[in-house]
Image (cartoon, rainbow, N blue to C red):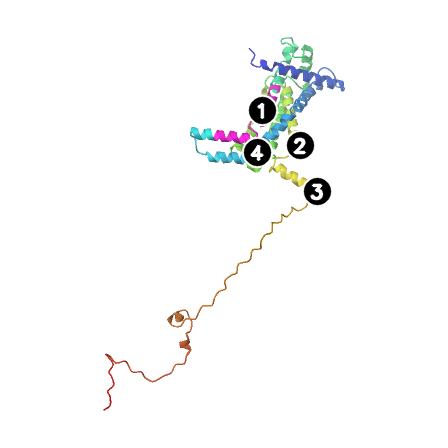
Amino acid sequence: MDFFAFLAPIEWVVAWIMYLCHQGLVFLGFSDGPGPAWVLSIVGLVVIIRILLIPLFFKQIKASRGMQMLQPEMQAIQKKYKGKSDPASREAMSRETMELYRKHGTNPFASCMPILLQSPIFFALFRVLNGLVPISDGSDDPIGPINAAVASDIESSSVFGANLSDVFLRTDDLQAKIVIAVLILAMCATTFFTQRQLTMKNMPKAALEGPMASTQKMMLYVFPFIFAVSGVNFPVGVLVYWTTTNLWSMGQQFYTIRRMPAPGSEAERLLKERQARKKAAKGIVEDAAPVIEQPRGQRQQPKRKDRQKPRPQVSGPSAATNGQKSPIEDAPVVDDGPSEPPASGPAKKPKKKQ
């Protein structure tokens, strides 16, 4: 039993889109049979698929912004349950996280939806291109309009000397290996810059911190590495498809980020600077922010400050200790002569004269 049998309807659709794109290119003047028209039909397949996915792309942007805006609250939940590994705490953390997703109307999988939906198309194209040789020699049944003659024309079409069905590990042609290696590098580079553009330029500073941001930075380097390792097993046509869809994603994201950046991101700051320069070039002066007049009420009287009262002059020893002169000290001193020492004992009464 074929594990990928469920891809048969998608393979049929992919085959028809390629065939119709080829017929359209022939109508425009390209030569029929083997040639660049079949290579460009893969590019046409990318354009048609990505146009159909535009509504999902905007949902992806909305979901990504929702994930960015909830980062501060997500960090608060993670900080709340940091170091708690008991089942009750884990259940409470999961419940609060899901409630946060419902509040912002987003979830982590919504931002990956376009990639997930493209995966069946990717594998269907992979199977169509891998089946060209068996279909051309009659070993396998045709796929839609791709019969033995058409499969032979597609298989013989080349990109700089490498046939669309050539695989790096299955060909002995050095020129084909070089072309495939260049296409693998182009696929990895476009994947990296597409993810970096979305992560670094269209995220607020709060979203660039925390565990989720660390995971996104790690995936920024993991995905190109995965494609580099697995790319040696892809036919040339698949490499052309994936590189083209990455270029489409870069252009689509560049336009969206430039015109509709996420709040608080670096792209929003650059957009405001461009708008300010355009207004300045046209001589438009932005109005100052209106001053909101506070409601008038009873005027509050200023509080009277107590004046410092002069210190009273104190006579006696206390005045001396304070460094002040007493009135007694200022009076003149009268010398009455030598004073007699007081007699000891009780004083004697004077005798009466007889």
Verify CB contact (< 8 Å) between mark 4 and mark 1: no
| Disc on the earlier residue, 4 or 2 | 4
Range drawn in magenta: 93-121
Asked if residue 219 shows in the view, the reply is yes
* Residue with the mark numbered 3: 279
Check disc 3 and give the amino acid type: Lys
Verify CB contact (< 8 Å) between mark 4 and mark 2: no
Residue shown at the point (50%, 36%) measured from the top left: 76
| Disc on res. 227 | 1
| Disc on the earlier residue, 4 or 3 | 4
State the CA–CA distance, disc 4 to disc 2: 19 Å
Check disc 2 and give the amino acid type: Tyr
* x then y, percent, for residue 226: 56, 24
* x then y, percent, for residue 28: 76, 20
Badge 2 element: helix
Farthest-out residue, bottom = 354
